[in-house]
Amino acid sequence: MGRREILKIKLMNKKNSKKNQGFSIIEVMVCVTIILVTFTSIYTLINHSMVFHDLAYSKLTASYLAQEGIEIVRNIRDNNYIRNGSNNYIKNESNNYILNESNNYIQNESWNVGLNPGNYQVQYNSTRLDDYTGNNLKIDSSGLYNYSDGETTRYNRMISIDKISDKEIRVTSIVKWSNRGINFDIQVEDHLYNWF
């Protein structure tokens, strides 16, 4: 083996030894930085998605609760019709309609019994309006919102009734809640009429 061949072997060994030395500290730092930026971005995206999901869920729940408040009041009005008959005129003991001085039938205003102007609270099985106390709704083990049983929720519902005329009332259902320190509210309004 000659001198040239020994030099070639030494040069090849130097090249191979440089390949096996590993990463420099700068290469490691760049790699760690890229990984940290990637994971931080993914964490932030997931966190924002969860916040938006929670906000959308709470808005949807609040809108259902507000609409439920309107439906409960409408159900009370409808039950007044059922209890008092289909026509809205007062009858005497002989089952004849009573006339006033102008020879017109006297109307029975019983369609809005229990629906006086004011602020109230109701739950899903209410047959009457309760005075508004400001308490938050609770949710029971079957997922129904009420004021008596279950875990207290973030939702507060107030039913406001205003008399527009003898044949019309305005019902406003307002649901308020707080989500991550921000206060929200949803209002649903409907007008209920004396059909007859």
Image (cartoon, rainbow, N blue to C red):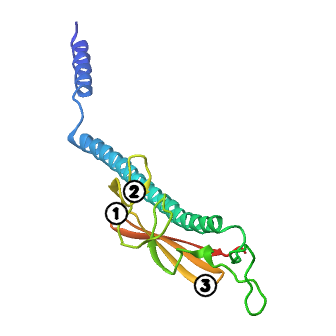
Q: Quadrant of the C terminus?
A: bottom right
Task: Inspect the image, locate mark 1, and give the three-letter code of the amino acid beneath it.
Answer: Arg
Residue 75 x, y percent position in the rendering: 58, 64
Which of marks 3 and 2 precedes in the sequence? 2
Task: Inspect the image, locate mark 3, and give the three-letter code of the amino acid beneath it.
Answer: Ile
Mark 1 closeness class: few <14, some 14–19, many ≥20 residues within 10 Å: few
Residue at 36% in and 72% down = 133
3D distance between C-alphas at marks 1 and 3: 38 Å
- What is the secondary structure assignment of the residue under circle 2? helix
Which of marks 2 and 1 precedes in the sequence? 2
Residue 194 x, y percent position in the rendering: 67, 76
Asked whether disc 1 touches disc 3, contact meaning CB atoms under 8 Å apart, the reply is no
Q: Closer to the camera: disc 2 or disc 3?
A: 3
Q: Nearer the viewer, residue 32 or 112?
A: 112
Mark 2 closeness class: few <14, some 14–19, many ≥20 residues within 10 Å: some
Asked whether disc 1 touches disc 2, contact meaning CB atoms under 8 Å apart, the reply is yes
Which of marks 3 and 1 precedes in the sequence? 3
The answer to whether 142 appears left or right of 112 in the picture is left
Q: Closer to the camera: disc 1 or disc 2?
A: 1
Furthest residue toward right: 103
- What is the secondary structure assignment of the residue under circle 1? loop
Furthest residue toward bottom: 101
Q: Which residue is mark 3?
A: 164
Residue 82 x, y percent position in the rendering: 64, 64
Above or below 33: residue 122: below
Q: Which residue is mark 1?
A: 180
Above or below 67: residue 23: above
Which numbered disc covers residue 51? 2
3D distance between C-alphas at marks 1 and 2: 9 Å
